[in-house]
Image (cartoon, rainbow, N blue to C red):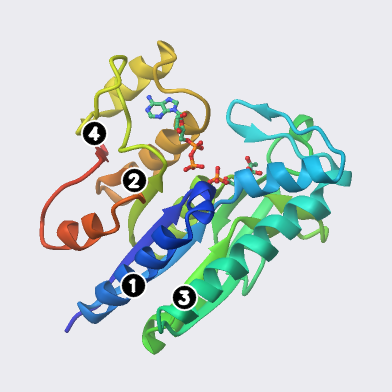
Amino acid sequence: MSTSTWVIKVGGELLSHPEQTQELMQTIAALQAQGVWVVLVHGGGDLAEAQLSANGFVSQKHQGLRVTPAEQMPVVAGALAGTANKILQAAAIKAGLNSLSVSLADANLVTAKIKDPALGLVGEVSPNDASLCNWAKAQGQLLIVSSIAANTQGQLLNVNADQAAAAIAELTQGQLLLLSNVAGVLDGAGELIETLSPTQAQTLIQQAVIRDGMQVKVQAAQALAKQLQQAVVVGSWSQPQQLLNWHSGQAFGTQVLPH
Ligand SMILES: Nc1ncnc2c1ncn2[C@@H]1O[C@H](COP(=O)(O)OP(=O)(O)O)[C@@H](O)[C@H]1O
Ligand SMILES: CC(=O)N[C@@H](CCC(=O)OP(=O)(O)O)C(=O)O
């Protein structure tokens, strides 16, 4: 059986739904049995927000990205590379999956640099070394990846998890699925957009119909779709069964098209 690679990204809100988290892991086990190797990239924005607030910090977002001053980085790294990453690792173990939970800073997966000093320690990443991925794929190990990176100056960087997932999909030449707390990209009337071309996306962003975190998501999806010349799915994590249906050819969510 030939093995295909899927990079599935889940937004942090999933972590507040343990039953759905478990269902997702069971679905990943079923996909693996059908010859799909999965990398699970995760967010954890809600958790980071809660931990920052518990530590007396006020956190701000700029165009969907969390401004991350150096003094807030230990808390953000703890929430994302620690709590969120290991909650998912534990859920994978419960589902009987053989898995390894790491961050973008591990195994030279990516190179990272500061995106814009005005945003603090927010990182921008490019794919680098696929050795760990190749090994994990050969072993049939699920890889769980948090979006904490490090630059060559030894600074931890906070990377938007959709951008992290796009870099890992480029690294592995995998199919990217960005799963969030909404059915997909919605139009001005709140209806699901089934296919989204670059021109349509540009218009909807200009009209602020696509905004905040969804704008970052759509732009990451578009860049990757163009790079790999294949559609990227933006859908919901609430019905993991859709992933199995998708494997048998049934579309769900929004297909973000390369052209
Ligand atoms: N056009 C749109 N369609 C769907 N969601 C949108 C749109 N514009 C903005 N959003 C917001 O984007 C959110 C998803 O992005 P984000 O919060 O970053 O999710 P995640 O944490 O899952 O990556 C939605 O819950 C919604 O509030
Ligand atoms: C720079 C930046 O915005 N980093 C994000 C990383 C986590 C993330 O993207 O989480 P979700 O997928 O749950 O939104 C943050 O701190 O929230």
CA distance for labels 1 and 4:
34 Å
Which residue matches tag 2?
236
Residue 167: x and y in percent read 49, 54
Q: Element under label 2?
A: strand
Q: Is residue 93 left or right of residue 238?
A: right
- Asked whether residue 114 is in view, the answer is no
Please determine whether, in this image, residue 202 is positioned above or below residue 67.
Answer: above
**Which circle's residue, 4 or 2, is located before the other in the chain?**
2
Q: Element under label 3?
A: helix
Residue visible at 53% across and 67% down in the picture = 88
Q: Nearer the viewer, residue 97 or 225?
A: 97
Picture quarter with the N terminus: bottom left
Badge 2: few (under 14), some or many (20 or more) residues near its Cα, within 10 Å? many
Q: How many marks?
A: 4
Amino acid on which the number 2 mark rests in the picture: Ser
Please determine whether, in this image, residue 190 is positioned above or below residue 240.
Answer: above
**Which circle's residue, 3 or 2, is located before the other in the chain?**
3
Residue visible at 49% across and 59% down in the picture = 41
Which residue matches tag 3?
92
Q: Nearer the viewer, residue 77 or 132?
A: 77
CA distance for labels 4 and 3:
36 Å
Which residue matches tag 1?
26
Residue 54: x and y in percent read 81, 45
Q: Element under label 1?
A: helix
- Number of the label disc, if any, that sits on residue 16: none
Which residue matches tag 4?
259
CA distance for labels 1 and 3:
8 Å
Asked whether mark 3 and ligand 2 are closer than 8 Å, the reply comes as no
Residue 37: x and y in percent read 33, 74
Do the numbered discs 4 and 3 sit on residues whose CB atoms are within 8 Å? no
Depth-wise, is mark 4 or mark 2 nearer the camera?
Answer: 2
Amino acid on which the number 1 mark rests in the picture: Gln
